[in-house]
Amino acid sequence: MDYDVGKDIIIDVKRYLRGKLIRGNKFLYRIADERGPAGSFMDSDSFSGSDKNRDNLKKDSIAVKKDRMADNEIRLEEGIRYSADLPAQNSLFEKRSPEKENKLEQIDFEGLKEEVSRCRRCELYKKRTNTVFGDGNASAGIVFLGEAPGKNEDLQGVPFVGRAGKLLDKILQAIDLKREDIFITNILKCRPPGNRDPKEDEIKACEAFLKRQLELIDPAVICALGRVAAQNLLRTKTPLGKLRGRIHYYNGVKTIVTYHPAALLRNPHFKRPTWEDMKLLKRIYSEAKEQNVV
Ligand code: URA
């Protein structure tokens, strides 16, 4: 794999290891620059998500500049192209005992969907008709993230099927995408009564489902729709107007923020900035495709 200067390599490492590792696996890696491999394989200690990867990569003083730009970002030194060579053979992986592992961290997509459908982690289960796990392509390069199911979504068990959903379909169309090309889900998997804002405890209860969903899909880019989705995903209180228009990182995955389609229905002035955001989304996605990471 080749990496461009200034790009976040964690994403690529995660992507390379997609489906090969579960939490607790050990793996070996080495990083090489254009002059050749940087030493022998290094022991990863163990794999426990992108944080661990970041630490491992940081430890490699030959290949990776020490300074950390942001939580999930490491920049490569100017003027040098690096490549990482990660052995994929299963024999190099050493599994920890599964008993020690948290259930959700190992679960596959179907298992996770099943788990969500049975969920009683917060009070919302009492009034739901259906859980709304998500819709679209489970290995999509783009994930759209909304707030919570509304009435129609609760009835059908599918996200974004009401008026806002129809507008979202048009937005997708405008950037040559269909539902089958992306995955859509929400911060909450059950409808809050009367479409009120999600409560803190509901968001907390549902968080692990979203985290695992995003780990399994491992998209090139996430697009958070609206304030609730953006602030909760990125764990910030920054207003939406200040979050949009730039790239953030969620566990190493490029993330952008735009207006919720329901807000767009209420306020046509949001159309232009939303279009700008969609162009940014498309650009990130196209770059990822060029780099063969989706
Ligand atoms: N609004 C959302 O945020 N999500 C849906 O699924 C529907 C409407």
Image (tube, rainbow, N blue to C red):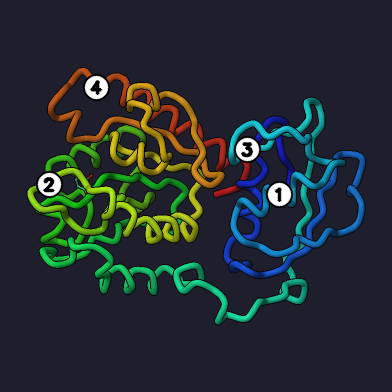
Q: Amino acid at mark 3?
A: Glu
Location of mark 1 (residue): 55
Q: Amino acid at mark 4?
A: Phe
Location of mark 4 (residue): 270
- Report the side of 245 relative to 275 (left or right): right
Q: Viewer-nearest of labels 4 and 2?
A: 2
Judge whether 76 appears above or below 205 on screen.
above
Location of mark 2 (residue): 195
Pick whichever of labels 4 and 3 is earlier in the sequence: 3
Which of the two residues, 206 or 173, is positioned nearer the viewer here?
Answer: 206
Q: Are marks 3 and 1 in contact (CB under 8 Å)?
A: no
Q: Amino acid at mark 2?
A: Asn
Local crowd size for mark 4, using a 10 Å CA cut-off: few (<14), some (14–19), many (≥20): some
Give the percent coordinates (x, y) of residue 249.
51, 38
Ligand 1 neighbours mark 1 (CB distance < 8 Å): no
Q: Are marks 4 and 3 in contact (CB under 8 Å)?
A: no
Pick whichever of labels 1 and 2 is earlier in the sequence: 1
Q: Amino acid at mark 1?
A: Asp
Q: Viewer-nearest of labels 3 and 1?
A: 1
Q: Are marks 3 and 2 in contact (CB under 8 Å)?
A: no
Residue at image point 32% right, 58% down:
206
Residue at image point 78% right, 45% down:
83
Give the percent coordinates (x, y) of residue 182.
37, 49
